Every structure is written in C-alpha cells, then in structure tokens.
Amino acid sequence: MPLSEHEQRMLDQIEQALYAEDPKFANTVRHTNPAVHYKRWIIKAVLGFFIGVVLLLAGLLIGNPVMQVIISVTGFLTMLACVLWGANAWRKSPAGGAEAAAPAAEGKRKRRGEGRPGMMNRFEERWRRRQEGEE
C-alpha cells in the first residue's frame, strides 16, 4: 500500500534528519540489502544440514553403542534445527515463500469481502480524514 503525501513528507524529513545527524550510519543503512542476510542464512542452514547428515552417518558407523546414540541424535537434531532455520530464512526473504503464498491469500480476501469495505479500509479512511483535519 503506498504512503499518503503527508506520510511521505514525514518519512523524507526523518530521512534528511538522519543524514544530517549521522551520514555514515545513514549510508550504511541505505546500501544494506536485507536479502543478502537471508541468503547467507539459507546457505549456512544447508551446510549445517549436511554436517548433521555426516554426524548421523558417523554415529551409525561407530562401534560404541552409547556413542552411536549420542552422535546420531546430535546429527538428527542438527539437521532438524537447520531445516527450521533455513525455512524461516526462506520465508522471510523477498524472493521466498511469503511472496509465493501472497497472491492466493489476497484473492481469497478479495472474494470474501467484495461487497463491503474492510475494517482496515475504514480505519485508514478515518486516519486520512483526521490527518487532513476533516474530523
């Protein structure tokens, strides 16, 4: 949803104040792409998953039964944690699962509330009128 003119002006003022106060930090924030962090997390999760597979297989090959269980369970838990970590990073990434699922959910919402304005639309309209001084 695009910002209103008033919100855009306020955002621009905040950005200018940030540049005036700390230009080095502002440049760092402006040029940092969050998608890079999620890609790193996914790569680390994949590597961790393979380490878990190696631990699981190594646990099966060891002769000591107690060490077999400990190492195999550690490998399995490592694999599970890395799958969850990678799935979370994939879901949060801009090209990940959130965008793929959004059109289907958006279509359902539109069909469900076609004839009447939604609660959020009413709130946004009230907020806009307050900001413009109509109320």
Image: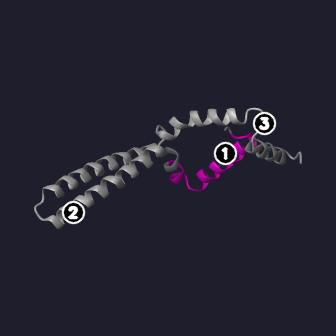
Which label lies toward us, 1 or 3?
A: 3
Residue 33 visible (yes or no): no
Q: Quadrant of the N terminus?
A: top right
Which is nearer the N-term, disc 1 or disc 3?
1
Label 1 to label 3, Cα distance in Å?
Answer: 34 Å
Label 2 belongs to which residue? 69
Q: Residue at x 69, y 36 (%)?
A: 112
Which is nearer the N-term, disc 1 or disc 2?
1
Residue 31 screen position, x and y as percent: 49, 44
- Marking on residue 12: 1
Q: Amino acid at mark 2?
A: Val
Residue 17 screen position, x and y as percent: 64, 53
Q: Where 55 sits versus 114, above or below? A: below
Q: Amino acid at mark 1?
A: Asp
SS under mark 3: loop
Q: Residue at x 77, y 32 (%)?
A: 115
Let me know if residue 9 is in the magenta part.
yes
Q: Residue furthest bottom?
A: 66
Q: Residue furthest right?
A: 135
Start and end of the magenta stretch?
Answer: 3-27
Q: Look at the image and name its color scheme.
A: one colour
SS under mark 1: helix
Q: Is residue 62 left or right of residue 19?
A: left
Label 3 to label 2, Cα distance in Å?
Answer: 59 Å
Q: Residue furthest left?
A: 63
Q: Amino acid at mark 3?
A: Arg
Q: Magenta stretch mostly in which secondary structure? A: helix
Mark 3 touching mark 2, by CB under 8 A? no
Label 3 belongs to which residue? 116
Residue 43 visible (yes or no): yes
